[in-house]
Image (spheres, rainbow, N blue to C red):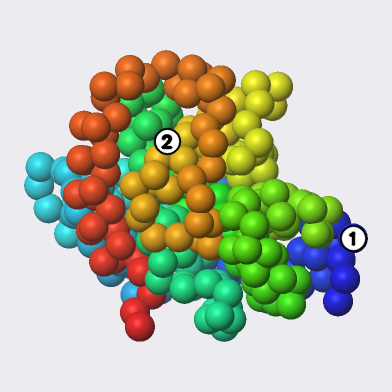
Amino acid sequence: MKYNDPTQLVQSVRTIYSLPANFHRINQAVDDINSSMDDIAEAILSDQSLATRLLKLANSSFYGFPSKIDTISHAVQMIGARQLRDLIYATSIIGVFEKIPANLVDMQSFWKHSIACGVIARLLAARRREPNTESFFLMGLVHDIGRLVLFQQMPDEAATIMLQVSEEHVLVYEKEKQILGFDHSDVGEALMNVWKLPPRMAESVRLHHRFHTNGRFPTESAIVHVTDVIVHALNIGSSGEKLVPPMHKDAWGRLDIPVEHISVLCKEAERQYTEMAQLLLPKK
């Protein structure tokens, strides 16, 4: 089917990409001002596999707490309810996408790239002392999610795009724009809106290739843009892009992080990424 714009595409298949029912219960508990930490923990414990995964995350180098976190209530107390919700979003989203044509993308490689982006985005945000760094992990994780929608819902067009990209040695998002009239970042933004994620999340997805300083959330967009370029340069996984996208000079300037800090950050990212990939990657 031919889609005229990304919103039409996402709206037509929105039920396919619905988040698990238990997530909505957790989300409601977090947003309820009358909910206690125990209420939020109880909502999380309604999904034992999710609770187990969150405890493993809480005890990983991603946080580096000095003592073991052995209950979900303790995790909520130490990490924060809203921060933990962003991690739940992240772990839930990975499970939403299945049956993507293997000839178009290697899903293990796709999620490796996405997880690495999440880890580095979070570290860049922490270096800038941004609040709720888990939200930046989520931004990095979902920045290419629109590409999966294209692979699944428009496989013929996606195959044509990937073939022409290989032949012409151009960037995938540029070829998407040329053939479809929109690209995966536009589709990703439309999906963020369907999921009712915050506007700063949607904007960071939309602008991760086309950063400019006129957006409402230039810091978020700059972090995701820079992160994507770094992970491509490090060659960690792939979402289908074979070239390293160019980095917008204004995006790097926006971060105000000395260049010499990047090598230290990348070493820390490698350690965290290895653990996160083991915990989050779908098992083959």
Q: Which numbered marker is on residue 60? A: none
Residue lying at the far left of the rendered structure: 67
Which residue is depicted at the point 37% across and 19% down? 257
Residue 277: give x, y in percent of width and height: 30, 62
Which residue is depicted at the point 51% across and 19% down? 254
| Nearer to us in this view, 130 or 189 | 189
Residue 14: give x, y in percent of width and height: 74, 69
Q: Is residue 91 left or right of residue 24?
A: left
Amino acid bearing label 2: Asn
Which residue is depicted at the point 35% across and 55% down? 236
Q: Which numbered marker is on residue 132? A: 2
Q: Which residue is mark 1?
A: 4
Q: In the picture, residue 282 is in which quadrant?
A: bottom left
Q: In the picture, residue 77 is in which quadrant?
A: top left
Q: Assess whether mark 1 and mark 2 are in contact (beta carbons under 8 angstroms).
A: no
Determine if residue 82 is in view. Answer: no
Crowd tier of the residue under label 2, counting other residues whose Cα lies within 10 Å: few below 14, some 14–19, many 20 or above: some
Q: Is residue 199 left or right of residue 63?
A: right
Which residue is depicted at the point 46% across and 41% down? 229
Residue 66: give x, y in percent of width and height: 10, 42
Tell me the element at label 1. loop
Nearer the observer, disc 2 or disc 1?
1
Residue 2 vs 246, above or below: the answer is: below
Residue 20: give x, y in percent of width and height: 55, 72
Q: In the picture, residue 157 is in which quadrant?
A: bottom right
Residue 141 vs 124, above or below: the answer is: below
**Quadrant of image for the C terminus:** bottom left
Amino acid bearing label 1: Asn
Count of labels shown? 2
**Quadrant of image for the N terminus:** bottom right
Residue 17 vs 170, above or below: the answer is: below
Determine if residue 93 is in view. Answer: yes
